Amino acid sequence: MKIKKINAFTISELLVVLIISSIVISLTFIVLGLVQKQITQIQKGYQSQQEILLLKRVLLKDINTHQVFFNAKQNRLILMNALDTIQYHFNSNYVLREIDTFKVKIKEKQFRLDNTLVKSGWIDAMQLDFNQTYTLKKVFIYKVKDATHYLNQ
């Protein structure tokens, strides 16, 4: 009686394939976790940058339509015109404008009047330094003045 041999893989070959497959799958999950962490950090950086740009846009509009006074004792920016008064309160983790909150960490603030540093009082420009890693780090906002401003002084 002749035994017919069946072409198949041996158990040792199957074990080698199984081990290699499990290593490849493990590496895939590790890389996937790292990519997810990186994407999360990119999203946080993008949100921080958008928050800074929104604060810059609102401050620029407000400064150019109001007279601006900085109260260093209360750490507040008070903007006044004939129609309304707007207050900005600077905290270490956020900036509060009336009821709007901008979640930005400000490292340093500089206020200027006619290109002279001002600790407290009337201002026409400001520089904000942010404590961000991947985003915009400095913003300079100034009031646009025309010739009539200087003629009326």
Image (cartoon, helix red, strand yellow):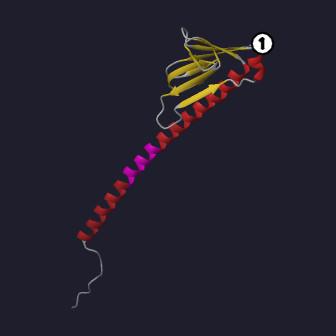
Q: Which residue is tagged 1? A: 82
Residue 23 spot, x, y in % from top left: 31, 58
State whether residue 142 is above or below residue 1: above
User: For the point 40% across and 47% down, which residue is it?
Assistant: 34
Q: Which of 52 and 120 is in front in this view?
A: 120
Residue type, label 1: Ala
- Label tally: 1
User: For the point 39% across and 51% down, which residue is it?
Assistant: 31
Quadrant, the N terminus: bottom left
Q: In which quarter of the image is residue 146?
A: top right
User: For the point 30% across and 63% down, which residue is it?
Assistant: 20
User: For the point 45% across and 44% down, which residue is it?
Assistant: 38
As drawn, which residue projects farthest toward the front?
Answer: 151
2 in magenta: no
Looking at the image, residue 102 sits to the left or right of residue 39; the answer is right
Give the SS element for disc 1. Answer: loop
Residue 3 spot, x, y in % from top left: 23, 87
Q: Which segment did they paint magenta?
A: 28-38
Residue 47 spot, x, y in % from top left: 55, 35
